[in-house]
Image (cartoon, helix red, strand yellow):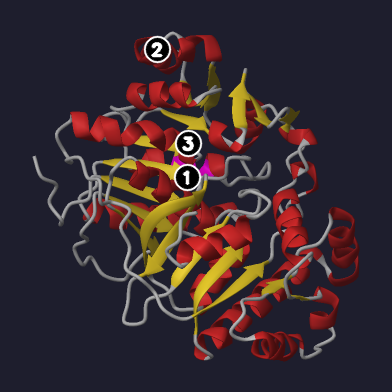
Amino acid sequence: MHTSTRHPVLGCIADDFTGATDLASMLVRGGMRTVQTIGVPASNTPLDADAVVVALKSRTIEAADAVNQSLAALDWLRAQGCRQFFFKYCSTFDSTDAGNIGPVAEALLDALAGQSGADFTIACPAFPENKRTVYRGHLFVGDALLSESGMEHHPLTPMRDPNLVRVLQRQSKAKVGLIASDTVAAGADAVRGAIASLRADGVRLAIADALTDADLRTLGAACADLALITGGSGVAIGLPDNIRRAGLIEPNDKAADLPAVEGAALVLAGSASKATNAQVAEWTATRPAFRVDPRALARSEPVVDEALAFIDAHAPQPVLIYATASPDEVKAVQQEVGSAAAGQLVEDALAAIARQARERGVRKFVVAGGETSGAVVQALGVQMLQIGPPIDPGVPVTVSVGDTPLALALKSGNFGARDFFDKALRYIEGERA
């Protein structure tokens, strides 16, 4: 049957903005018309979509606040008529022993109590296309364990334990289990059997192994009857097929179509990840760039004005404004300025630059870093995004909904090829080569 525009089927909650676009891109690739909201909308205006992704900025806030924001998103999605729900977090399981993955997942299950399939969920951050795999409960980034991938140096959520069963158990009240790779390889029926056994053993949350896209499709099929699924965007590979088999949506080969956007372009980078460091190095080798120094911001130097003057001096050529630094440089800045203060100074500065660049006619933004992307879209007043085709795995082109559309490529720090910035600019110009 045809999906009613008043009743999206799948409701998703993402703990950061780039993660939201990552998930939305996966659903669009599966033929689901998908919109992304920036925060929980104030109204219940019907949406013309099969899936809705609510983008929160809850990954690194206090666990209680993350729970409250996530529950507010769930209430709004239920009011939209959504039947199944997805809690999306990073494919590197970014969190601390205090949360926020476990507390949010358990709170969502509690809120869904009474709905069929709401007594159990999986947790699977695997995204093989981006070299994130889970084996025997251990998360790998490429060939390295999570704890040896560079994520152990993350300034906000250092990941020093690759055993996700242990990580999630430290965050959770309920018993955490494992759906191992040999079970997943045996197919959806085997996974459903494992889920039944885990439920009987009192397990409420289970890490699920996945090494390939085929494993993710198996998990998706096996979880068709769960009220809540949690994981990285990879698990969403199998969800559109489930929903089509249930007769709730029809095939759609136009799900990724976007309107054209005219105007100048700007690249902003706040992430300190290995991938973004490499992308910054690639750009600065041949293209104009301006570095934002947190120490200068802390001294109240006119860094924002200097960056805007740099943009003006190179117009209409796109430039890169970046605060990206090596782990040693980040550590030195944190010692001098303070960890939270340094991050906030950078976010505020890049947000201010984006807002004033828009006033100068910039309409296309490439942004690197989840926290940075959240700050930028909020500064730009973006409330909803249409999701288009992927630039690199997990990073789609998007266009804001409103009177003055903006084209945005919002990239998780760890995602994208070395030439991502140039590639993203081509994509938002409508080129695909």
Real-space CA distance between mark 3 and mark 2, rounded to the nearest whole angstrom: 17 Å
Distance from Cα at disc 3 to Cα at disc 1: 10 Å
| Quadrant occupied by the N terminus | top left
N-term-proximal mark, 3 vs 2: 2
Read off the residue under disc 3. 234
* Corner quadrant of residue 54: bottom left
Question: Is residue 67 at least partly visible in the picture?
Answer: no
Query: Between 192 and 314, which is closer to the camera in this rendering?
Result: 314
Which mark lies nearer to you, 3 or 1? 3
Mark 3 lies on a secondary structure that is helix
**Residue underneath mark 2:** 187
Picture residue at 55% right of the left edge, 72% below the top: 376
Mark found first going from the N terminus, 3 or 1:
1
- Magenta segment, which residues? 103-107
Left or right of residue 225, residue 237 in this image: right
Q: Earlier in the sequence, mark 2 or mark 1?
A: 1
The quadrant in which residue 211 appears is top right
**Residue 105 lies in magenta, yes or no?**
yes
Measure the C-alpha gap from mark 2 to mark 1.
23 Å
The amino acid type found where label 1 is placed reads Lys
Label number found at residue 88: 1
**Most prominent secondary structure in the magenta stretch?**
helix
Q: Is residue 135 left or right of residue 110?
A: right
Q: Considering the numbered disc 2 on the image, is that residue within a helix, a strand or a loop?
A: loop
